[in-house]
């Protein structure tokens, strides 16, 4: 694929969290762009596992981002030019049960990645992935902008808010130091809305939970039918990360900042609306609503303002939320009903649709 001005062809890319849902899609895309990719991640987090099914042509290191020495050795041996840092403890409910683990991975682990990059002369760019939950969410139907206050009610959200502070500290202290004049590597942070797509089998996520239920002949238990989120296909934020990585590799210091990636016009859908749309594609899916008033707090409303990415990166979404849901439900339906793996087909379809829209990264 000749995309992003072909900048990733032959580039040495270190991708943390490559065995996870988003990481596996990004690994495949980078592979198709001709990048030399090394993945760094814990062992496969689910069975089935999307990365194992895809088997992209990349090398892997099984490791924990809390392991400073292994990270240091991996950077030293591979000498990456750009780092996409996706490895994280990414579940809100899990963070209530294991808050210290969540803080260690998402805060100290992130600092370990930056420290390894700081001591590796080959690194020119870092794209650090946090979350839309990094913001102090007042749930007031006002879309969060990049310069809004960081916060976090639950341990997961708080850990992502703290990770953003770590980003700013490393950028100011080491990666853009006025005293030393050093401006490399350029470091950006990215925050995406609720990401869906085929190949996600994580626990406590809406669509994976629904899919697991239907294939086992059960009804999915829906706990927050009125929660409202900016749903988007996984390829949407990944295209944004790749756009941003291109600018960082080109030395564009304006790109070394925080960026939101989500649906245009701050669009959102309720969980109940998403479920109804999934059933239109895969009627076998069934569920029951059982709201738990004593469950740990999860934000019921969250919206992102993505005008900055649209204006300064010329990034725009390709697929509507309806199309994203259709593609996601269709992926799982094909996988379980006929054993088809539609990942590459979906990627090619996404790129083709982006070209029709003449988005800048396709030209």
Image: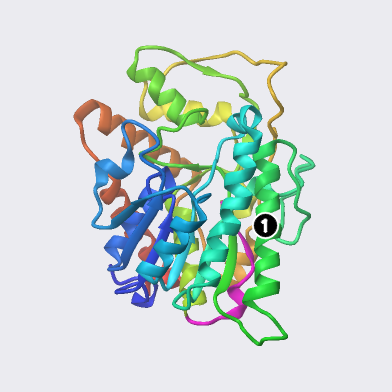
Q: Residue at x 57, y 26 (%)?
A: 272
Residue 303 in view, yes or no: no
Above or below: residue 191 compared with residue 204: below
Depth order, front residue of 64/13: 64
Locate residue 105, reporting x and y percent. 57, 45
The count of marks equals 1
> Is residue 253 rendered magenta in the image?
yes
Q: Is residue 53 above or below residue 226?
A: below
Display coloring:
rainbow
Q: Residue at x 68, y 20 (%)?
A: 295
Say whether residue 183 is left or right of residue 55.
right
Front-most of 265 and 340?
340
Residue 229 visible in the shown view: yes
Q: Quarter of the image holding residue 34?
A: bottom left
Query: In this image, 144 relative to 113: left or right?
Result: right
* Residue 261 magenta: yes
Q: Which residue is under mark 1?
A: 164
Q: Quadrant of the N terminus?
A: bottom left
Q: Along the line of sight, which residue is nearer the eye, 190 or 308?
A: 190
Quadrant including the C terminus: bottom left
Residue 71 locus on image (x, y percent): 46, 58
> Is disc 1 surrounded by few (<14), some (14 to 19) or many (20+) residues within 10 Å?
many
The secondary structure type at the circle numbered 1 is helix
Relative to 355, residue 235 above or below: above
* Chain part drawn in magenta: 250-262
- Where does residue 200 sit, x and y in percent of width and height? 40, 37
Q: Is residue 341 above or below residue 237?
A: above
Q: Position of residue 205 (x, y in %)?
A: 51, 31
The residue sitting at 43% across, 16% down in the picture is 286
Q: At 26% across and 33% down in the image, what residue appears?
A: 334
């Amino acid at each position: 694929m000749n995309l992003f001005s072909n900048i990733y062809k032959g580039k040495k890319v270190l991708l943390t969290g490559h065995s996870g849902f988003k990481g596996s899609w990004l690994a495949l895309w980078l592979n198709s762009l001709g990048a030399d990719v090394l993945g760094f991640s814990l062992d496969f987090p689910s069975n089935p596992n999307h990365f194992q099914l895809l088997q992209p042509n990349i090398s892997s290191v099984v490791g924990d981002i809390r392991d400073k020495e292994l990270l240091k050795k991996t950077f030293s041996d591979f000498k990456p030019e750009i780092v996409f840092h996706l490895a994280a403890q990414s579940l809100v409910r899990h963070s209530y049960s294991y808050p210290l683990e969540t803080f260690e991975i998402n805060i100290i682990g992130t600092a370990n990645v930056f420290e390894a990059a700081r001591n590796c002369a080959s690194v020119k760019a870092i794209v650090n992935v946090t979350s839309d939950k990094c913001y102090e969410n007042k749930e007031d139907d006002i879309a969060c902008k990049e310069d809004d206050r960081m916060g976090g009610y639950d341990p997961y959200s708080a850990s992502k808010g703290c990770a953003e502070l770590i980003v700013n500290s490393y950028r100011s202290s080491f990666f853009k130091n006025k005293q030393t004049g050093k401006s490399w590597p350029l470091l950006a942070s990215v925050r995406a809305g609720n990401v869906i797509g085929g190949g996600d089998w994580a626990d406590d996520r809406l669509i994976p939970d629904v899919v697991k239920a239907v294939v086992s002949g059960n009804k999915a238990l829906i706990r927050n039918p009125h929660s409202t989120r900016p749903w988007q296909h996984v390829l949407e934020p990944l295209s944004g990360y790749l756009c941003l990585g291109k600018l960082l590799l080109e030395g564009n210091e304006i790109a070394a900042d925080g960026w939101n990636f989500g649906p245009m016009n701050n669009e959102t859908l309720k969980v109940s609306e998403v479920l109804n749309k999934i059933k239109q594609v895969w009627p076998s899916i069934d569920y029951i609503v059982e709201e738990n008033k004593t469950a740990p707090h999860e934000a019921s409303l969250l919206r992102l303002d993505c005008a900055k990415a649209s204006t300064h990166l010329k990034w725009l979404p390709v697929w509507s939320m309806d199309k994203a849901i259709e593609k996601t439900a269709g992926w799982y339906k094909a996988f379980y009903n006929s054993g088809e793996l539609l990942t590459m087909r979906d990627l090619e379809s996404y790129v083709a649709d982006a070209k029709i829209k003449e988005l800048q990264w396709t030209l």
